Amino acid sequence: MNSRKYLLTALLLAFAEVQLSAQAPNGTGRYYEMANNAKGKELKTMLFHIIKNPEVDTYNQLWVDYGYTDRRSDGFLWDMYSEVTNYEIGGSLQGATIKAEGSSYNREHSFPKSWFGEETPMYTDLMQVVPVDGWVNSMRNNFPYGETKGEKNHSANYFSKLGKCTVSGYDGTVFEPNDEYKGDFARIYFYMATCYEDRIGEWKEKNSDTDMLSGDNYTAYADWALPMLMRWSANDPVSQKEIDRNNAVQTIQGNRNPFVDYPGLEQYVWGDKTDVAFAYDNYGGTPGDGGETPDDPVPAAEGEPLQGVQTFVKINNTVDLEAGCHYLVVNEEAGTALSAPNAYNTYYIRKSVPVEIADNTITTESGAEGMPYTLVVGGKVGAYTLYDPVNKVYLAQIDNGKNNLYDVDNATDDMALWSIKFDGGNATIRNKDNNRYVGYNVGNPRFTTYKYYSEYVVPVQLYKQVTTDGIRRPMPSDVHPAAAPYIVYSICGVKVRQARRMTDALEGLPQGVYIVGGKKYVVR
């Protein structure tokens, strides 16, 4: 065993002591000081000089390293390609013969080794070589990451998919990881582009199967791929899992991933903040670019029940998740929507009521007996709250091993916080406390939470209320009122702020759609 492993506990304790006094994130102290005040391309180069030349382990040693870097809280292996595996780290299934999903786990070059000619130190860089299910890894092969309908192959429950790319600009075969880990892989790719800035520009010319690369040291990734990775990172912000893994990797190979330490840093390197100077000890990532940190407070949102007939339209993007807006949870195939709470024997559920759906639109009253119930979304990306304005409670999932959908009076605990992501028109509403999904039970009609989707438990869709009190839908001919102040509304009619000048009206708002003076604006 590498002798450095015997020092792991001492290193972690020393690292914790640094955290107490450091101003930089995750106890990094002055690690990134060299990059202070740099911008754009220069910033990326400064980061390269900080994190380059990792002291990587041998390929065999990675099996041992995973016990430190990829151990779940329950002791099993953290597998980002499959949701049905529970591998014992170092057990008999480590590197075993691949027979089916769940039969073996192995070492996955998330950045395929053929792309860099299997050279070192990339080959054993623990930051990008992650443990995954062997069968899904074999399915992935060395195809680039992308987005697909999964018509060629998929893992259990379509957690990972293989098929023709649906991202504009590329139609080759791609492998799509689950929404839950897209940000993780995007930040690994940002790391690779930075840690190997002096080499990555040559890899496309040397290897023929690198459609994801640009051949340029700065941009690193093709025109279709870089915007996708930026979007993945924004929609799936840095998690505590990534922070813990980043800390553990540093104790083993000595370097860090700055895109984990500074959420949204990619915007300063390639995005819309390339003219903003980086401050290593006073960093200000902004909402919507992945700048939220796991420890930020969750701003719960409440509201009053809707009155009268309202119109709801289907949404397919997190941009349309806005605090204070009302939503219906729907299963389109059954033509039904989530309704009032009900105790079903010892299982707490939400009733199912029929709704008419036409052209991705539902027109209905809500909140009464036999009617759907709306939920008011609050919180932030990765930690949304779902408030029932009729019963004045938040939806929750208490970790008791049952498929329950509870109601609680406040949203201060993880059991009342949810991640919401979209895939193929479905909304994956997943509880932060125990990772159960909101689903619709086809066999015994009801909405509640489950570990997995199946033949009888199917995904749900989200519909957003779009009729507003006094706010008409914007028309191309709409103009701004001549006089200040400018009142800003969310798309569903909630007053957001009042500004003296139009130039200040949208400044600093989270991504979303807003109405000012009867005209629609999109903040990205």
Image (cartoon, grey):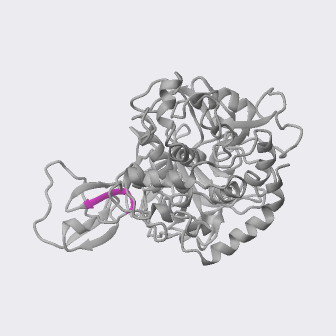
From the viewer's side, name the closer residue of 419 and 441.
Answer: 419
Quarter of the figure that contains the C terminus: bottom left
**Residue 165 visible to the viewer:** yes
Lateral position of residue 266 relative to residue 247, left or right: left
Residue farthest toward the right in the current orientation of the protein: 92
Lateral position of residue 97 relative to residue 280, left or right: right
Q: Position of residue 418 (x, y in %)?
A: 58, 58
Q: Position of residue 391 (x, y in %)?
A: 55, 69
Q: Position of residue 278 (x, y in %)?
A: 41, 62
- Residue at the image position 42 percent from the left and 55 percent from the top: 43
Q: Which residues are magenta?
A: 510-515
The image quadrant that residue 240 belongs to is: bottom right
The image quadrant that residue 345 belongs to is: bottom right
- Residue at the image position 54 percent from the left and 34 percent from the top: 145
Which SS type dominates the magenta stretch?
strand
From the viewer's side, name the closer residue of 24 and 197.
Answer: 197
Instruction: Indicate whether 79 appears above or below 47.
Output: above
Instruction: Indicate whether 64 appears above or below 278.
Output: above
Instruction: Indicate whether 231 appears above or below 140.
Output: below
- Residue at the image position 69 percent from the left and 32 percent from the top: 137
- Residue at the image position 14 percent from the left and 61 percent from the top: 480
Lateral position of residue 31 relative to residue 214, left or right: right
The magenta stretch spans residue 294: no
